[in-house]
Amino acid sequence: MKQLPVIFKCSHHRNGNSDHAAALFLQGIRAAGGAAEIINLGDMDFEHCIGCLKCRTAADNRCIFAEKDGAQELYDKIISAPFTFFASPIYFYHLPSRLKTFIDRGQWAFEAATGNSAVMDGLCARPAYACLFAGRPKGEKLFEGAELSLKFFLRFFKAELKPSMVFRGIDEPQDLKNDQKKCAQVIEYGLNAWQKLEDNG
Ligand SMILES: Cc1cc2nc3c(=O)[nH]c(=O)nc-3n(C[C@H](O)[C@H](O)[C@H](O)COP(=O)(O)O)c2cc1C
């Protein structure tokens, strides 16, 4: 079976805004006739990158921790997914630490993409989407760090981060659920993602 799109829930607690956004995005995909796999990345602990740079010269740029946790399996999913979606809160102007640790561990992909990797060279461009939540109602730069990190991390997997949906002033776990207009926007975001996939064959 072909790999499904992957939805990453990146908050460190369940049933809040990011989880709800993931459910709505999936609802949109399903409304367009599609399906997706959901990963609770926010529940997963990863070994952190220690900057040893062994991945620069290792076979297949494999990380020394590749067998020690579930990170590599998730990178493989990103590689084979037709698109990915990240639903995440902002923590201190950035992404939550588990997602950031996952991103740092993606250094092997940077080495592969900038070296001679048949896997990375053979990939075609695929879109990536994100929905980001911040409790503060204002702040021009609230999402800047998070978007930059996600964008450049994904780029090494040939996934292109499309304009993300960002929501300010969403703080309590039920805030998104209580705003039907915003919910409808996320559903449409998912629906469009699947339709674009169909349109591109
Ligand atoms: C550790 C931590 C750090 C946070 N840092 C910020 C921040 O820098 N700016 C902001 O606007 N909100 C911040 N928030 C608020 C969350 O972004 C907000 O509550 C979000 O809606 C939580 O999403 P969730 O329900 O998916 O976990 C922070 C929350 C936590 C727990």
Image: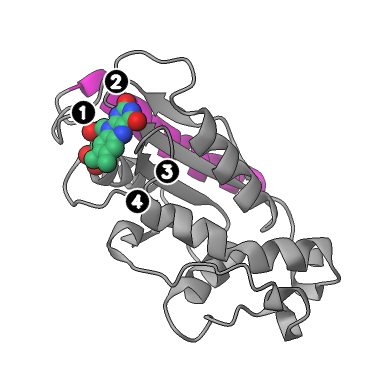
**Whether residue 94 is situated above or below residue 72 in the rendered picture:** above
The residue under label 3 is which amino acid type?
A: Leu
Label 2 close to label 1 by CB (< 8 Å): yes
Query: Which residue position is annotated with label 3?
Result: 95
Q: Earlier in the sequence, mark 1 or mark 4?
A: 4
* Gap between marks 2 and 1 measured at Cα: 7 Å
Report x, y in % for residue 135. Answer: 26, 26
- As helix, strand or loop, the secondary structure at mark 3 comes to loop
Q: Earlier in the sequence, mark 2 or mark 1?
A: 2
Q: Residue at x 66, y 58 (%)?
A: 157
Secondary structure mostly seen in the magenta stretch: helix
The residue under label 4 is which amino acid type?
A: Cys
Label 2 close to label 3 by CB (< 8 Å): no
Q: Earlier in the sequence, mark 1 or mark 3?
A: 3
* Gap between marks 1 and 3 measured at Cα: 15 Å
Counting the numbered discs, the total is 4
Q: Say which of marks 4 and 3 sits in front.
A: 3
Q: Which residues are magenta?
A: 179-201
Label 1 close to label 3 by CB (< 8 Å): no
**Whether residue 71 is situated above or below residue 40 in the rendered picture:** below
* Gap between marks 1 and 4 measured at Cα: 15 Å
- Was residue 172 drawn as part of the magenta stretch in this picture? no
Label 2 beta carbon within 8 A of ligand 1: yes
For residue 106, what is the image quadrant?
A: bottom right
Label 4 close to label 3 by CB (< 8 Å): yes
Query: Which residue position is annotated with label 4?
Result: 10
The answer, for residue 81, to whether it is visible in the render is: no
Q: Earlier in the sequence, mark 4 or mark 3?
A: 4
Query: Which residue position is annotated with label 1?
Result: 171
Label 4 beta carbon within 8 A of ligand 1: yes
